[in-house]
Image (tube, helix red, strand yellow):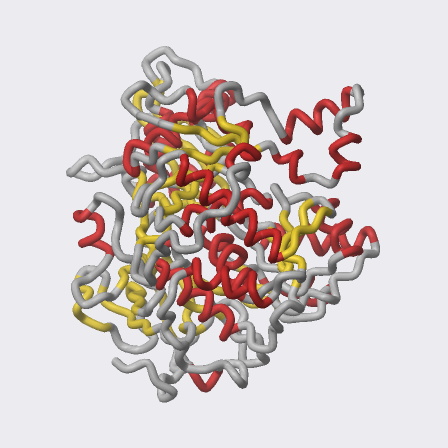
Amino acid sequence: MPIAAEQPWVKNYQPGVPARIEIPTESLVAMVEHSVAEAGSSPAMEFFGRRTTYAELGDQISRAAEGLRRLGVRAGDRVALILPNCPQHVVAFYAVLRLGAVVVEHNPLYTSRELRHQFEDHQARVVIAWDKAVAAVRSFPGDIEIDHVVSVNLLTAFPAAKRLALRLPLPSVRASRDALTAPAPGATPWEALLGHGPIAEDHPRPGVDDLAAIQYTSGTTGRPKGAMLTHLNLYANALQGEAWMHGAEYRKEIFYAILPMFHAFGMTLYLTYGVRKQALLVLFPKFDPGLILAAMKKSPATVYCAVPPIYERTAMAAREKGVSLRSCRFCISGAMNLPDHVVELWESMSGGLLVEGYGMTESSPVALGNPFHPSRRTGTIGVPFPSTLMKVVDQDDPTREVAQGEPGELLLQGPQVFQGYWNNPEETAKTLLPDGWLRTGDIVTVDEDGFTTIVDRAKELIITGGFNVSPSEVEAVLRLHADVVDAAVVGKPLERGGEMVVAAVELEAGAVLDEAALRAHCRDHLAAYKVPRRVVQIEDTPRSMLGKVLRKEVRERVLPLV
């Protein structure tokens, strides 16, 4: 099936968007070096008002790469990043790649237990971590060997005046400071990593087909699966995004980095596409409407990509405070369904269309999107990106395509499709077909113009706040509690989009349901967004003859009660 202009969906592209992109022939390291050379004096990053130019970014990348080289990092080594959005994250990402090493991104709010499973899989020996996450790494069991931990204090990237203000001996200031930093005894400070001078110019650089990143994605089993993404995969997806945002200008755009860069969406949007576009990245360590609106007054966003709840909260806060959002021209929503009322609210406040897209970690991540054009169709996830193909097949027989308009599993093919799961050939074989088609696990319908609508998710993942939650992982934690015999976890759709995590538990004889205690137990083992919002008791957990939890039956039985 050729990628050509005669594909039915291409006619609905925004005028000027090509059917194909040029497949990259160089690595992300070459890409960032081009941006540094061409945009040296232009601002690359802004963090709480402090700006860093592209020339300064390039110098810091080179120095951090040399520091990592001296710690023993070599080509092919995995280096773990456990960082929120901050300038050090951007530098660390490219410093690891400069050595030909592999970035492994992690959620800095994960518990030690959640991180441990991923470290057991990728076996990185060098870690660059937010200082508040260092303790979680230090508490790993002895069989996980870590050679070096580099700690990042976010306050060192603040403007001097803000750093001084955070030293005031006031309870409120102390609380703000404690939320941003913590002692990390025994770790190598980030600043020491940059203290050795730049890396030698002739140090080998990676190739376009080399592995760039391992990005973890939740599976239905709850076990971590590390999607292997090459320089070509990530660079190609950046070029596809560049083609889709037709009209965006080099050194003119301002990206608000609200989505976490440890997530595939944020990684591609900011770390690759934003840097490729030589844009200003305004970095936010977490979503805070007050910080967003304050930044809008100094550096108004032109590219504002987020999940539906963030769009809604931003627009409502802007309307309440009288802050203009008219600069926001390119706005893509992803990771969860986009309700019509959010589209109407945002577009009434901003200067551009809010369109929905679709992707998954295994496709680097973006594969489909609605055009920035009146041809967009709300309620759908759009049409395939340039150089991307799709087909809809029988879920039980992926070799058989279904008739147009009938529901079936969405399959994808393109330069952004991943190389398989790290050390997991069995799961790779289930997801990546021999002819290169990626099984998404999503059940869709496609109309005659290629606009695609998700009708069901085969993978049973729960999407909350734009993040995936594996029901099996939460169930396993609940079963660790002494009062719990069995557990089943499902998602309850919310009116404003996304889902709420709901747990149904079967208790030991004589035990009394203590919802608060079970939620507290989950908080000890899971990131906050995975903790069930509601816990209800059931007499028996419905299972198939093979012992699989029948989550559809659980939903029918439990969701009317919450």
State left or right for residue 365 relative to residue 249.
left
Q: Quadrant of residue 452?
A: bottom left
Q: Position of residue 329 (x, y in %)?
A: 66, 69
Q: Position of residue 220 (x, y in %)?
A: 30, 43
- The relative height of residue 537 versus residue 318 in the rendered view (above or below) is above
Which residue is more in the foreground, 105 or 474? 105
Q: Is residue 351 visible?
A: yes
State left or right for residue 220 relative to residue 289.
left
Which residue corresponds to the image point at 39% horizontal and 55% vertical from the top-left?
Answer: 202
Which residue corresponds to the image point at 42% horizontal and 64% vertical from the top-left?
Answer: 235
- The relative height of residue 158 versus residue 443 in the rendered view (above or below) is above
- The relative height of residue 18 versus residue 385 in the rendered view (above or below) is below
State left or right for residue 321 relative to residue 216.
right
Q: Is residue 362 visible?
A: no
Image quadrant where one finds the N terminus: bottom left
Which residue corresponds to the image point at 58% horizontal and 59% vertical from the top-left?
Answer: 305
Q: Position of residue 112 (x, y in %)?
A: 42, 26
Extreme residue in the right direction? 322
Q: Position of residue 420 (x, y in %)?
A: 25, 53
Which residue is more in the foreground, 225 or 449? 225
Extreme residue in the bottom direction? 6
Which residue is more in the foreground, 213 or 421? 213
